[in-house]
Amino acid sequence: MYKPTSRTMLYEEVINQILDLIKKGLWKPGEKIPTEMELAQSFEVSRNSMREALKVLEHLKIIQSKAGKGTYLLENSIQNIQALELASVMREANSLDQLMDTRLIIEPELTYRAAAQASLDELNNLEKLLKDSIEAVATNTYFPSLGFSFHMEIAKISRNTLLYKFLESITLELMAQRKLLVLSHLSKKDLLKEIEEHRFIFEAIKQNNPEEAKKRMYVHIQNAKKFLPVKE
Amino acid sequence: MYKPTSRTMLYEEVINQILDLIKKGLWKPGEKIPTEMELAQSFEVSRNSMREALKVLEHLKIIQSKAGKGTYLLENSIQNIQALELASVMREANSLDQLMDTRLIIEPELTYRAAAQASLDELNNLEKLLKDSIEAVATNTYFPSLGFSFHMEIAKISRNTLLYKFLESITLELMAQRKLLVLSHLSKKDLLKEIEEHRFIFEAIKQNNPEEAKKRMYVHIQNAKKFLPVKE
DNA sequence: AAGTATTTGTCCGTATGTATC
DNA sequence: GGATACATACGGACAAATACT
């Protein structure tokens, strides 16, 4: 027999109940909600515990408290609850499969846009990253984040900050999971092949050829998938 | 002269400082951090304010407190900080332009996958949504979220939960902004045209034609962009 | 204009439960 | 079991900001 990890703490309970109230529409955006004392009484907790819950919701931009006035639901509380749930999905250990499939959908398109609009400065940055990678492999100081930074630089050039941030989250998650993977000890030969593919993509971007750049990125990510553990 | 919007509250200050400590690597994942009392003293705040900050970080899955033991940084605190920043980017009023461009990148691919793997049940659900829309237009009870639900249903069929949630966030943001837009008072003729495009997409999915379904979704979103206010 | 009530911000003290040795 | 360290939770108090009269 084992304990259920410990009973949920009071403030977490309160948070969930309040989120439910908002999602069910009983409390509406912009409205004033009861005072700390009233809430504490109806939830049957102390004012301190109530405040812990309220401060969490305030930090999440769902409510806002003002001294002397009271506490109000923010106008976009619903969207912020949604953003919260997105972060939570992002947190839940995603399957490698789904993470890579998502990259396969996003990155080729970002590469297309990058190739269409890269400035000279941006091209130089990309090229420098390439050179750094080659040098790092030669001196055995290569580490995975170097490869990722090439991908992120392309995403940056695409100038879609939303997808940039989204891809950044995916990348970090992959790097965290990568520790356990074959990927971490690729042979020098495999690394060079990967970098060669990077150069191939870079060339298409440099030549202002979006269609070709997009295709090459697609193939590149497909190839990377081969190094992942097989599904059973 | 004006007030600086009100001085930042203590617990927010503390949160930011702690996040910095983690990002700078002074506190490492898995490590134990000082006790509430010690922290309160070094940040020069009361234990209550300290707890408010800690509870926020705990809810964000960055730290975890255990009675009798102490407070620890979670192993994946870094990724969770990242997920947090994603939520924050999502929250910041995104330009319509970027939101729609992101849909243009994601949705055609999701539609491709939906067409490739939709079950009979899933097809029936989609068809029902279509019929509901047509009826709603006929009886003048159509509202924008009906149109969005068709798109979300397709995303669901794609079975990429990560992109599904991401798209859901985008959709909510768009609906929030839509209130101010021309879109809200489309003519009946325009609405019927939109629904006709939905049917067109649906047919391709039903016929198991991923390439065609993808193309039609792309065109559909492109058309929707025409109703947006022009950039200056 | 002044004073009072309301509400959040902040702090303190204390009792209880839980884990460690 | 007993002692210690720590988080959990409660209640009381006063300050600061705002609203009301």
Image (spheres, coloured by chain):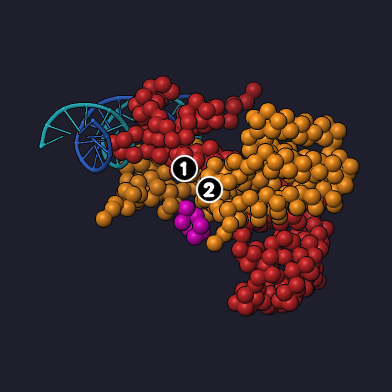
Chain colours: A orange, B red, C blue, D cyan
Q: Label 2 marks which chain's residue?
A: A
Image coordinates of residue D16 in percent, x first then y, are 46, 26
**Residue A62, percent from left and from top:** 53, 46
Number of the label disc, if any, that sits on residue A20 = none
Query: Within the magenta stretch, is there residue A142?
Result: no
Check disc 2 and report the residue beneath it: A91
Residue located beneath label 1 in the image: B61
Q: Position of residue A19 (x, y in %)?
A: 47, 53
Whether residue A54 is visible:
no
Label 2 SS: helix
Q: Is residue B24 above or below residue C18?
A: above
Q: Give, as a single range, the part of the protein colored magenta.
A: A19-26
Look at the image and tell me in which quarter the N terminus of chain B lies.
top right
Chain bearing mark 1: B
Up-down relation of residue B24 to residue B163 (above or below): above
In the displayed structure image, the side of residue B183 where residue A51 appears, left or right: left
Q: Residues within 10 Å of mark 1 (few under 14, many from 20)?
A: many
Residue B171 image position (x, y, % from top left): 66, 57
Q: Main secondary structure of the magenta part?
A: helix
- Residues marked 1 and 2, same chain: no
Q: Is residue B210 left or right of residue B152?
A: right
Would residue A182 appear left or right of D19 to someone viewing this image? right
- Tell which of D19 and B67 is nearer to you: B67
Residue A54: which quarter of the image?
top left
Which residue type does callout 1 highlight? Lys
Q: Quadrant where the C terminus of chain B lies?
A: top right
